[in-house]
Amino acid sequence: MKRYQLAQVNVAVPRAPVDSPLLADFVAALDPINRLADGSPGFVWRLQTAEGNATAVRMSDERLLVNMSVWESVEALSDFVYRSDHVEVMRRRRKWFETMDLYLALWWIPRGHIPTVAEAEERLTHLRAHGPSAYAFTFRQPFPPPDATHAAAPPPRDDDRCPGP
């Protein structure tokens, strides 16, 4: 059993309030896409309130919607993001969200650890300030888990920009 799992955070600034007509299609897609994630190979956990709301949790910047999850590997997360119905949501992201230079961070956590929003914010801030490293990285520049014996990583992708929650 692997000792580390992959944590991910992505953030987005909505173009309108979550309950607005502009975001209605996004909100309607949340439950089906979250069910798809929950049942995907390699999925471990995702951030949500006790009521199951995935959009109610915020970072220190209250404008940001935050999406966090834990996966068994970069490959498992990549398969969900780029090779499932999640792609259809990504294709419409610019309709719903402001363009951001960097809104995704990945990092390795010990198996069983549940990352906090504060931890995710710290990783994203570090990535913005210092670029990809073993501390925080992207799909384009992945790093192996701390206990990896070799640096096997998927090749960079042109479509590796996660759209937001």
Image: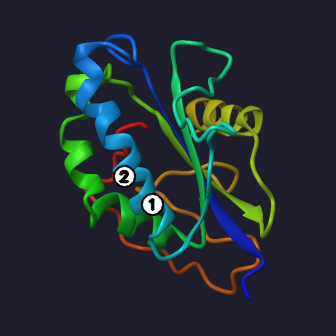
Q: Quadrant of residue 57?
A: top right
Q: Residue at x 50, y 62 (%)?
A: 38
Q: Quadrant of residue 37?
A: bottom left
Q: Residue at x 43, y 37 (%)?
A: 165
What residue type is disc 2 on?
Ile
Front in this rendered view, residue 8 or 100 = 8
**Where is residue 7 drawn, in percent x and y?**
63, 55
Q: What residue occupies the far front of the structure in this picture?
A: 51
How many residues crowd mark 2 within 10 Å: few (<14), some (14–19), many (20+)?
A: some
Numbered badge on residue 33 = 2
Front in this rendered view, residue 84 or 33 = 33
**Where is residue 132 drawn, in percent x and y?**
56, 48
What residue type is disc 1 on?
Ala
Locate residue 25 relative to residue 78 in the image: left or right. left
Check disc 1 and report its element: helix, strand or loop. helix
Locate residue 67 relative to residue 121 in the image: left or right. left
Quadrant location of the N terminus?
Answer: bottom right
Q: Quadrant of residue 51?
A: top right
How many residues crowd mark 1 within 10 Å: few (<14), some (14–19), many (20+)?
A: many
Distance of label 2 from label 1 (alpha carbons): 6 Å
Check disc 2 and report its element: helix, strand or loop. helix
**Where is residue 45 drawn, in percent x and y?**
63, 58
Numbered badge on residue 158 = none
Locate residue 162 relative to residue 52 in the image: left or right. left
From what the image shows, is residue 66 above or below residue 90?
A: above
> Which residue in the structure is indicated by mark 1?
37
From what the image shows, is residue 119 above or below residue 16?
A: below
How is colour applied across the structure in the image? rainbow
For the residues bearing labels 2 and 1, Cβ distance under 8 angstroms: yes
Q: Residue at x 40, y 18 (%)?
A: 18
**Where is residue 35 drawn, in percent x and y?**
43, 58
